[in-house]
Image (cartoon, rainbow, N blue to C red):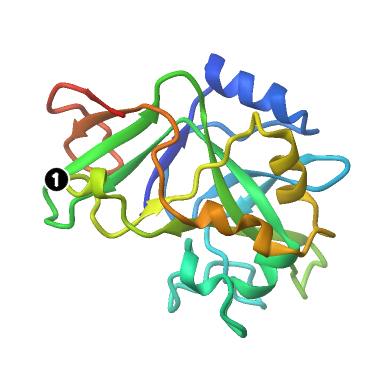
């Protein structure tokens, strides 16, 4: 996880955007894969929406993903590991990555599910970095989604990990998460334990990128 998600212009996304009151426009897309351009919400006290490459480690010369090192996700156990790629961003450049749904695979190259929340959009807990392209002086952003240990209820969906989902209705949490000056990451320790905060609608699909349902949806609570 997480290797695919989408962001759709619906009422749930509009509600999330309104709640976070970030300046800018979301980048909607029906299918987003690692390396794609995605929307991130960051900054404090003024929040803004920026476009970032969904791959935390970029080539410093080209600003393109460094595909030698997978970095579209940042594992929970690397966040507090000195000299890891996630160490500095976890302390100084956290973000929220909005989404409508995401895809998880069982690992057998056959079984995939679409996961969405019943009454709200998703707010992935993410990290970001910035890079100045040497040839143009352009500022570019890169990002990753934080992943947590596996959840027992997910054993038939994705038994290895699950994404960090933030409660955007918790104003104190959001304020701290988006504040680059807030470096006391011990305050986020409870977030790194997997829990099912809200009912999840799970739909079997054929393949990532296709999103075609192949079975009945069910609710996971």
Identity of the residue drawn at 43% across and 79% down: 68
- Residue 169 visible, this orientation: yes
Residue 7, percent from left and from top: 50, 32
Identity of the residue drawn at 12% across and 25% down: 215
Labels in figure, total: 1
Q: Is residue 146 left or right of residue 5?
A: right
- Residue 2 visible, this orientation: no
The single residue placed furthest to the top in the displayed view is 11
The single residue placed furthest to the right in the displayed view is 45
Residue 48, percent from left and from top: 78, 40
Residue 35, percent from left and from top: 48, 57
Identity of the residue drawn at 77% across and 75% down: 134
Write down the quadrant of residue 144 in the picture: bottom right
Looking at the rendered structure, the secondary structure element under dot 1 is: loop
Q: Is residue 5 left or right of residue 114?
A: right
126 in relation to 48, above or below? below
Write down the quadrant of residue 98 in the picture: top right
Q: Is residue 123 left or right of residue 215?
A: right
219 in relation to 197, above or below? above
- State the residue position of label 1: 111
54 in relation to 135, above or below? above
Identity of the residue drawn at 71% across and 41% down: 174
Residue 40, percent from left and from top: 65, 45
Depth order, front residue of 34/150: 150
Pointer 1: residues within 10 angstroms few (<14), some, or many (20+)?
Answer: some
């Amino acid at each position: 996880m997480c290797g695919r998600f989408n962001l759709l212009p619906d009422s749930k996304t509009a509600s999330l955007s309104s709640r976070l009151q970030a300046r800018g426009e979301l980048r909607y897309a029906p299918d987003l894969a690692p390396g794609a351009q995605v929307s991130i919400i960051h900054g404090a006290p003024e929040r803004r929406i920026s476009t970032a490459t969904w791959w935390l480690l970029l080539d410093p010369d080209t600003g393109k993903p460094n595909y030698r090192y997978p970095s579209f996700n940042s594992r929970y156990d690397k966040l507090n590991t000195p000299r890891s790629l996630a160490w500095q961003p976890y302390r100084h450049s956290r973000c929220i990555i909005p989404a409508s749904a995401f895809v998880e695979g069982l690992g057998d190259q056959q079984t995939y599910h679409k996961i969405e929340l019943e009454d709200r959009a998703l707010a992935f807990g993410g990290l970001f970095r910035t890079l100045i392209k040497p040839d143009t002086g352009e500022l570019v952003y890169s990002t990753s989604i934080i992943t947590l240990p596996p959840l027992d209820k997910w054993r038939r969906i994705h038994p290895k990990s699950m994404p960090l989902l933030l409660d955007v209705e918790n104003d104190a949490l959001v304020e701290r998460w988006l504040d680059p000056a807030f470096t006391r990451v011990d305050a986020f320790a409870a977030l790194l334990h997997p829990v099912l905060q809200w009912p999840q609608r799970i739909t079997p699909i054929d393949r990532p990128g296709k999103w075609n349902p192949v079975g009945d949806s069910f609710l996971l609570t």
